[in-house]
Structures are given as structure tokens and as C-alpha cells.
Amino acid sequence: MEATILKWLKQPGDPVKMDETVLEIATDKVDSEVPSTAEGVIDTVLYKVNDVVPVGAVIARIKTAAAEPSGNGNPVSSHPATVIQQAQKLAETTTTNYAPASTHSNGNRFYSPLVLNIAASEGISMSELEKIGGSGNEGRVTKKDILEYVSRKKSGGTAIARESRTVSTPVETSVQREISQVSNQTSATPASYTGNVEIIEMDRMRKLIAKHMVDSKHTSAHVTSFTEADVTNMVLWREKIKKDFEKRENEKITFTPLFIEAIVKCIKKYPWLNSSIDGDKIIVKKDIHIGMATALPSGNLIVPVIKNADQLNLVGLTKQVNGLAIAARNNKLKPDDTLGGTFTLTNVGSFGSLMGTPIINQPQVAILAVGAIKKRPVVIETEQGDSIAIRHMMYLSMSYDHRIIDGALGATFLNAVAKELENFDGNREI
């Protein structure tokens, strides 16, 4: 619904070409560059850095060649340019993913999920929210409006009332009440810290990650199942072909595309793992878009998405995995790169963890974590009988939404993925 202006790369008077980057914006998923919609000279910049701008707003004007004085001496008006449209698709998806049961009040006034979450965390009831004046489109309350209201409220000031509307107060959910109570207690008693401490303000992305994780726990009934897999064949195969693969494809092959390949095969057998919930309806997704949790240099986390992963061969998956990972680490992801995931893979083993209990990436119903691959002595069955051998072993864990995925289905799917990895063809050719 909105984006924050991070940095203007062009100022009034600067020339600009079509599609040249004019500014950088931040949405709740990624930071993004916004290109010019025309060629000319920047005439006016309408918003400042850190301003929160609604989708569809004109944020700059560009004088184009057509703006030169005409024959009768009347100049043509400047071209309204650089509307925040790149964020619109992302914002719509984010609204779908994280919206509570209703984003409308009894008075049919729309509130974005971001505004509702801020209201809940600050202990603002719906009746109080209805009285806040909105500066957005059609009087909509923006993030800036509600934060200013909270600031005035905490400082003892009064809010700008919304005129000519009286509504009844809807019943708050238990979660909203609990958050409100905690928030009221917190605001009444300022936090104090003793001892030798360092206070670090969360950055914007960390705040959003924290919010989404709490939202997920409030939304889904989380259950986690565990299994282990003997991935010796896969490890030895990768070791054998990785140099030739890199030389031929100019890409390094990691384990991630191999994991995704196994997940995709199993989703085709158990499609409910590739679904979402809408009220009492189960929405089974026919497209398989695999989210790939990626750690950023800042320590934050983002989940780029491999679209139509079932239509890619191993080379295609490898190129997608590497390309998205590099883009994420260099802050080059586009808004569309993080949209539409239907199932998520997270590699907790990349930092040495043996296993984890991941939190579901809403509105998906499952997330699978792979742990570190370790050599261990294990009992194996041979034609000559049982024996002990050194094998490459790995734990897999999967958190799933118990509202629709029961233990039987969750465990069956997880073990199917493990079997795919164990039965990897060591003589496979690419």
C-alpha cells in the first residue's frame, strides 16, 4: 500500500534518461530502484527522504522536450513521472499474505495490514482508529498517520479526529486484546536496563522480520517433524562432477538445487503441501514456486523465490539459485523476486546447525529445513548382512500448519524427501 523513500539519486535541474534510476524506495520486502518514466530534466521533487508515500502517488515531475514553449508562447505542463508502481504488485501480495480476517471496520473504512498491526501493538482499538484523520487516498490512514497519532498520544497531545463518521466498535480478537494489554503495560512503565548493556535499535528489515514471524505463529498451528537421510551418494556425485560442471556451465553447483529438485518431486506426489488456507477453504497451488531462505551480510534474512521450479532441470535450478543468492547479498533483488512462494526451503546447516524448527512463511503451510551434512558411523544393510560404515548423514525437519496438514501427511512427505535424497543416482549425467 505504501513505500518509504530512501534516497534521491536525481535532484531538480538534473537531466534524466528514460528508465534511468531516479530514486531508491523501501517496501516491507525489499529495497528497490525506481526508474524514470520519461526523458528530460527533473523539475520538481514532491517528497523528501524517509517520507512514506502511498502507491500511485506522483513523487516527481519531469520537464520533457514537449514542455518547451509552443508557438503561441504557452509552455506545455511538465510530465508527472516516477509513480511508485514497482511496489504496487508487491504491496498487493503482502496485503494478501498478512491480512487479518478483516481489514475493514464496521463503517467500511479500509485499513492496511501494516496499520492494523501497528494499532494492535500500540493498544489502539478500532473505535479509536476510526477517529484518526487519514492523509492517504480517499482518506485512508497511512503508516505515517498512525505513527504520528501514537507519538501525539504518548506525549499527551490530542489526535486529529476523523469527521462525520460514527461507528460501533467491533469485538477485538483475543490476540489483539493480549497485545494491547502488553503494549499498555509497556508504555505505562518505561523500560530500564541495569548492568553493562548496549542498546541497539532494530533496523527496518529486522522489525519487519520480527513482525512476520510473530504473525505466522499467531496464524498457524505449528508442528515440526524430523527425519534423517543418508546423502552419501549425492555428496560423492557432487564432488565428482562439480569441477566439470563449473567449467561447462560457468556456475558452481551447491546442494541447494539438489534439495529443491527432491522437494519438487515430492510436492507432485503430495500437493497439499503446496497450498494455503483461506478461511475454511484449502487453496491447492498448481504452480510450484520454491522460496529459498537466504542470509544477508547484515544478518537479516530474505526469501527469494524460484518460479515454476518443476519446469527447470538441474542446470536451470542451479542458475536460478546462484543468481537469486547473489542478487540478495548485493541488494539487487527486484520486488517480483520475493513474490508468490508456495513452499520454502531453509538451509540451517549452512552455518553448522544440525537441525532446526523453522517458522512457516505465510501464507504457505510448510517450510523444510536441512541441517549440516556430517560423517557418522551408521549401520547399513548389505547382502552379506548388517555392517557399520562411515556415511554422510543429514537431518531434515519440517514445520507445517496443523490446521490442514496432519502428522501422517507431514511425516510421509518429509520421509519421501529423505528417500529421494538417499536414492540419488550416483552415476547420473547432466
Image (tube, rainbow, N blue to C red):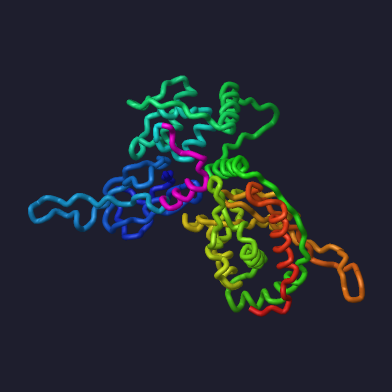
Residue beneath the point at 88% across and 65% down? 379
Quarter of the figure with the N terminus? top left
**Left or right of 421 on screen, residue 6:** left
Residue 429 in sight here = yes
Q: In the picture shown, does residue 30 fall above or below 105? A: below
Q: Position of residue 12 (x, y in %)?
A: 30, 48
Residue 351 in sight here = no
Q: Nearer the viewer, residue 7 or 322?
A: 322
Q: Is residue 91 magenta?
A: yes
Q: Which residues are magenta?
A: 88-106
Residue beneath the point at 58% across and 73% down? 313
Residue beneath the point at 41% across and 41% down? 52
Q: Identify the image quadrant of residue 408.
A: bottom right
Q: Position of residue 368 (x, y in %)?
A: 66, 56
Q: In the picture shown, does residue 7 fall above or below 107? A: below
Q: Is residue 149 magenta?
A: no
Quarter of the figure with the C terminus? bottom right
Q: Nearer the viewer, residue 148 or 260?
A: 260
